[in-house]
Structure formats: C-alpha cells, structure tokens
Amino acid sequence: MKIGLALLVAAVLVLHHDIWNWKDASLVFGFLPVGLAYHVGYSLLASGTMAILVKYAWPKNLDDDDEVAA
Amino acid sequence: MIPALIVFAYLAVVLYIGIFAFRKGSSSSGEDFFVASRKLGPMVFLLSIFGTNMTAVAILGSSGFAYQRGIGVYALMASSSGIVIPLTLWLIGTRLWSLGKKHGHITQVQFLRDRWESGGIGTFIAIVTALMLVPYIIIGVMGGGSTLETISGGQVPYAVGGAIVAITVVAYVFFGGMRGTALVNTFQTVLFLAFGVTAFTLIAKSVGGFPATMQAISEGPQSFLLTRERMPAEEFFSYMFIPLSAVMFPHIAIMCMTAEKVTHFKRTVVLYPICILLIWLPSVYLGVVASKVIPGLSPSEANDVIIRLLSQNTSPILAGVLGAGIMACVMASDSQILALSTVFTEDLFAYYGGRKKFGPKAEVWAGRTFIVLIGIVSYVIALALKEKANIFELAIRFAFSGFAALAPVMLAALFWKRSTKWGALAATIWVVGCIFANWHLTNISDAIAPKPPKRPAASAMRGGPAAGGGPGVQRGPQAGAPGAPVAQPSGAPQVTGDGPTPAPSMIPVAQGGSPEGMRPAGPGAGPGAGGPGAGGPGGPGGKKKPPTAVRIFPQLGDLFLRGPVNVTIYGFLPVFPMVVGSALLMLLVSLITPPPSKATIDKYFSK
C-alpha cells in the first residue's frame, strides 16, 4: 500500500510538467487556454490525491495524541 | 474616493475583530497570545492557514506576473503549490502539531533545539529565519500602500497608505495575538475567495466576454501569453521547489500548532488546492486579459493591473468592495509580524532568561513590543525600497528560496534518527551562503544585465488616468519601435540567439527573480549554449526567443547566467541547487558526526 501511494504521489508530481501543452495556444470552451485548463484539472487532481492520502496514509498514532489532548 | 472609503471601512472591521479577540483571550498567557491556546476549530484553521500563506503575491503579484508572462504563471506557482504545500502540511505540519502539543513547543526552533540538544543551532536558525521573514512582511506594507494609492486615485499617497495598513495590522496583532490574527485571516480569506469569483464575472461582462478577448490575444503579437513557449523548462522545474518553503516559514509552522485536533489537518490538506484554484485562477486569467484591455504597462505598473482593470470596468462601489478583497490578501503580513515577534520572544528573549527573570506576563508584553518595532522597521524599509525592488522579487529571491532550502533540515529532524546538529548547521550555513552568493552575483552582474525591452504602444492603448482615478496607464514607445533590445555590455560576452529576435511585442519581464526566455540557444551562443533544458519545452523548435542572458564569468560557460533580473545556475533558479545542496549536506555531515543521544532518539522516535 505504502509503495502504491508513494508511486501515486510521484506520478502526480511528474504530471505537473505537461510538456505537451507547452506551445499549444488552443482554447478550451472558447475562452480557456489549454495549458491553463490542464492545470485547473491538475489542482483538482491534487485535491483528490490528498483525499486518498488522508484516507489511506493518515498517521494514526497522531490521532492518539488527539485523544490524549481531549 | 468611494472605493477608498469602503476599504477604510474594511480596515475598521478587521481592527474590531482584533480587539474582540483581545477581550476573549487571556492577557497573561504566552500560549494563549502566541498560539491561541491551541484551540482553533477546523474551519478557522483551514481558512487562517490558507489566508496566512496568501500575500500580495497571490493577487497583485500573480496578475502582474501573468500580464507579462502569461498563463504559465498558474502552473508555475499555483498548481505546484496546490500539491506541494498540502503534502508538506500532511507530512510535516501534523508532526509539528503533535510534538508541540506533547512537549509544549510554540515555534519550530524550540523543537529543533531540543531535537539536536543544542541551543546554539536553534539560535542560529531563529536569526536566519527571522531575517528571511522580514522581506515577506515588507511585501504587505508595500502592497497595502500601492493598493490604497491606486484605489483612491492617488489621493492616499503610497507612504500614507502603507502607514495606515501597517498601523491597522500592528494594532490588531498587538491586541488580539494569534486568536485575533486567525479570526482576521479567516474573515480575509472568505473575502478574497469571494473576490476572485466576483471580479471574474464582472470583468467578463464589461470587456464583452472572455472568448472574444482571448481570441484577439491568440491572433495578436501577445499570443505567447496563452502558452509557456517563453518559459524555460529549467525555470518551470525550479519553481516546483519553492512551495517547500511554506511549512518552514515560522508563521505557517506556528499556525500548525494552533489546531485543536490533528484531524483538523485532514480537511485543510484536501481543500487547500481548491482554495488556491479559486484565488489564483481568476488572478492569472485576468492578468492575461488585461494585457489586451490595458496594454503597455511597465513591470512595476503591472503589479497594480488587477486594480486598474477593476477601476475601469466596475462601478466605484464595487471597485471598493473588490479593493477590500485585494486588501485582505495584501494584509496577510499580520501572521508574519506575529510569528517574528514569537520568534524574538520565545526563541531569544524567553530562552535566554527573560521568562525566568520577568515572568510569563512580561513575555507577552515583550511580544507586543516586538510587534510594534517590527511594524515600524518594515514600514521604513517599505518606503526606502519602493523604487528599488518590486514585491515579487523580494519574496522569491530571499525568503522563498531560503525557507525552501531549509525544508530538508526539518524533514531530517522529524524522520531521520541519525540526523545530527552538525548536519543541520552545515545545511543552514549553506543556505545563508547561497543567499549571500546570489546577492553578490546579482550585484556584480547588474552592470551587464540585459535590459528589459521597451514596451511598444498598442493601438488599443488607453492613455491617461485610469477610470476610477487610478494613476493611469503610461504610454510606451511608439508601436513598431525596436523590440527585444538586449543590452550589449562592454567587456561581457553576450549570449546570443540564433536568429532574428521576435517581432516587437510585450516581451515578458521577470518579476519573480525568474529568468524569462533566457536560455542561450543555438550556434550563436557558443560552447555551452543550448545546455540543459535548452532543448526542452520552450527550447529549439519553437519561436526564436529574445537573447536575454549573459554569462557572468565567460570562462565558466553557462554556469552563472544573468538575466534582466536574476542570476541562474545553468538556467535553474538558485532554489534548486540550494535545496539539493542542503539535503546533501544534511545527509553527509550527519553521517560523519556523532549521532544524537539515546534519550533524545527515544523522546522523538519511540511510538
């Protein structure tokens, strides 16, 4: 599981470098440059990735500290 | 003047929030004043930590930068931050929270001192981080001054506007401490998130729809703004390291200690990229739109471009409300002022006997005194540097890169038992050395720095004062004037391009200490040209780029290049080698020095 999540994070970081959009000036929906549209999608992907990490890789021992604090 | 009055009303509200927090808190407890008794709820925690991290850069810097460099600015700074910052909060922030709660730490230096059993290393890091935080605070004052000046149509001068903002921030931080700062940040975050959506909608209507504007840009000489063709791959890659700075900023680290429960981080890390999207997308997009609507602004004028756009395209009342939204972003310097005061108070004053000698109440008053002093010093510097450096450059060059390069130190302290204080010391000295080296190289190469091209006047340029009373759009040179001029420094070899430079156009000028279009490319560049990244995106195969980099030491080839603003190392921003060097030194020096004691390892690594 840990390796899978590490690979997921690495893949997301690599996907940030969308070299295929570098010189593409085409417009998505007629108003959004494709390079910008891609990175809007990337922001959503980042949020989804963090949701996965929170669900499957949350440091449970820190939750114990929560209980102690409570 | 109506917009300025609305902004004043906004300032009164944040002042009230600070004083309200003062009434709710305990005036004698350091933990209450500096970390709000570690009792922030989940929404306040999310919104305040996000608001804390958004400064003038987010709206003013990003739109001004996008005005010059195009949509790539979003990928460069926003979407990279959208993944790296939540990752660091998840990995580092949660651990800092836990250790802070367990051992009573308020600052990261308190943890580092204890972790490495050394007061000296803590003091060194405290001083280094405090010095690197100062430029960040100055940004707030500068942004406040220029925002008020523009919104009021010049009736509130920069110096007065900066003073008003500085006094307001100092007042509510002074009274409200962390609770007041967090509540104000929450209010501000809501305001500037709303700002983005509103500004986007209103301006779209006013300019006759975005599709037509974008179409016109794509068919004109500024079509590069819709791509990253003039953004070197090395620069793009380097920017990925900048968000590592977030959790090393004292104000973010201290903010991590304020959550009531560690589970508050869950919502924060998931929603953080969305918050960034909501504020940066409109700012960057509108910056590009402005290049068509208000062409011809100089780099420093471009910092105000979004305010000009609002002034010209909305009613004064709406412009005022939106101006308050911008002000909310600009005033994120509150938590930096508080953090700096916390560092002085906790890491220096209290640590060196102040708490023992004068008691806990004096600690809070020492913190408040520091807040006032920091406010005054920042204001004076903001006035002195107004004409010398723009806000983006200050932030990126010194603070962001330096803090990012300290991230390996924190990671090692938290996750690597074998890491030692000597490794931390070596890494910190490396960071300081790099900052000075960067400063020195920038200084000695100023004379040979390629000059930014003069801006052509576009046929659609609107001269004269901006509607709404803004300072106006300055006219550039006549259309058709020679573009892409590059200084031919005497005695310094010019890294040349391999053909004619692009037609006169709005060639972007680096604002963030970033080189643009600076890769030496082609045969004319001589040995070393077309080095790493030159063949990457933005390299050969695309349009010819303006030759805008010179070698600082010709005998070293492309090792140190100087662009219009910044020095690069083989085309990479200094932050990249700084982070790598810091990590390597941490690793190597730790391995050859004695490990920490068993007691310390047990304290921090036992389950």
Image (tube, rainbow, N blue to C red):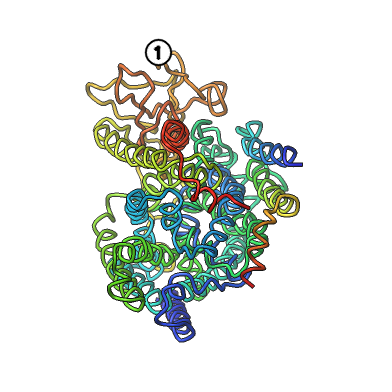
Chain of the residue displaying label 1 = B
Q: Quick check: can you spot residue B475?
A: no
> In front: B421, or B393?
B421
Q: Position of residue B261 (x, y in %)?
A: 62, 67
Q: Is residue B510 above or below residue B554?
A: below
Q: Residue furthest bottom?
A: B23
Q: Quick check: can you spot residue B432?
A: yes
Tell whether B147 sits left or right of B74. left
Q: Is residue B550 above or below residue B65?
A: above
What residue sits 42% from the left and 39% below the top? B514
Q: Position of residue B580 (x, y in %)?
A: 47, 33
What residue sits 58% from the left and 71% below the top? B44
> In front: B101, or A47?
B101
Please state, as top left, top right, bottom left or bottom right, where the N terminus of chain B lies in the image: bottom left
Count of marks placed on residues: 1
Q: Position of residue A61 (x, y in %)?
A: 67, 56
Tell whether B434 sits left or right of B64. left
Disc 1 residue type? Answer: Pro
Question: How dense is the environment of label 1, judged by Cα within 10 Å: few (below 14), some, or many (20 and up)?
Answer: few
> In front: B207, or B557?
B557
Q: Position of residue B445 (x, y in %)?
A: 27, 32
Q: Is residue B250 above or below residue B194?
A: above
Per the image, the residue denoted by label 1 is B527
Tell whether A53 sits left or right of B445. right
- Label 1 residue SS: loop
